[in-house]
Amino acid sequence: MLDGSLSSFSGEPVNATAWFKYFAFDVMTDIHYGQSLDMLKNGKDHYAIELSHAGVAVMGPLTPVPWLCQLLMSIPGAQKEWQAYQVWAHEELQSRIKRKPEHIDSVSHPLNAAQEQGGVDVEENYKWLFGDFIANIGAGSETILSTMVFLFYHLAAAPTEITKLRTELQALTSFSDNRELTSMPHLNGVINETLRLHPPIPSGGLRDTPPEGLEIDGTYVPGGVTVLLPFAPSPPSNLPHPKPIDITNQPLHNAGRYMCIGKNLALMELRIVTALLVSRYEISFAPGEDGTSLFRDMKDAFTAAPGDLRLVFQRRGEA
């Protein structure tokens, strides 16, 4: 539906940030619990996503002090948007529990596990199920949204990269063949470089220093201290690059037991959408657009929340 939505603008400027958001949340809610929010169809935000964004706005700034976030949430009325979002999520989860989905979704397995361990009416079971339900909606959508926005910003700023991608994609037999897409070095190089330059979770995560402590840039940090490790690109780089930088072995999605459970799904989405849009559209900045709003208005809401980016998607052969 993203293809059809962009095509309907007939080459007129569109807010790519908004439309990539509609796509990301529609896909994730459908995969997650078999119920799309129909934002692509309606061309506007779903009220629940507006509530979610308002509720998580403080998470980025308060990442270093999570206890303060918990304290604020305990103050009546201080987080009314987030509380309203939780009410919506509870109703959606209850609806999903009662209906049999047409296909296996990501709620299916934890729901089956909860039912095998006493049922969803057991408070502890429902807490885990509800926590996963909320986390997966945001984690599987916000990260795709920000990566797509920055990726297409760089492509619009570097048309030679689009030409290279189209040359590589000529050998593609199907946009839905993830094995084919995974084997394309330039496509994956552009995605990896975007992830490196613009981490979807810029604040990183909290870590405890080892018992013996460690030295960070000449400063000794004692053992057992909680530190925040923001992700930052190093060394600085910008597209275009001489050839795709292969950073697949770097922990873009964390590593080991902390590796993102949705990594493969996220990369598949990014490959398919990038390949399809680059193949079917001429992509450029809208008149007067240079990415200023994108970077100036970006916020750290735990996940990156990019500002508006106005692009032109002109269907190839229809100019």
Image (cartoon, rainbow, N blue to C red):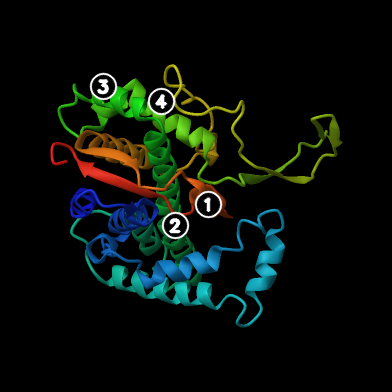
Residue 120 found in image quarter: bottom left
Q: How crowded is mark 1: few (under 14 residues within 10 Å), some or many (20 or more)?
A: many
What residue did someone put label 2 on? Answer: 138
What residue did someone put label 4 on? Answer: 189
Q: Where is residue 315 in the image (x, y as percent from the top left)?
A: 18, 42
Query: What whole-number distance in Å separates the C-alpha atoms at marks 3 and 2?
Result: 32 Å
What residue did someone put label 1 on? Answer: 303
Q: Which of 83 and 232 is in front in this view?
A: 232
Proximity of marks 1 and 2: CB atoms separated by less than 8 Å: yes
Q: Which of marks 1 and 3 is in front?
A: 3
Q: Which of marks 3 and 2 is in front?
A: 3
Which sits earlier in the primary sequence, circle 2 or circle 4? 2
Query: What whole-number distance in Å separates the C-alpha atoms at marks 1 and 2?
Result: 9 Å
Element on which disc 2 rests:
helix
Q: Position of residue 288 (x, y in %)?
A: 41, 48
Q: How crowded is mark 4: few (under 14 residues within 10 Å), some or many (20 or more)?
A: some
Residue 116 to residue 281: above or below = below
Query: What whole-number distance in Å separates the C-alpha atoms at marks 4 and 3?
Result: 12 Å
Q: Nearer the viewer, residue 108 or 229?
A: 229
What residue did someone put label 3 on? Answer: 168
Which sits earlier in the primary sequence, circle 3 or circle 2? 2
- Numbered-mark total: 4
Q: Which amino acid does label 4 sit on?
A: Gly
Q: Which amino acid does label 3 sit on?
A: Glu
Proximity of marks 2 and 4: CB atoms separated by less than 8 Å: no
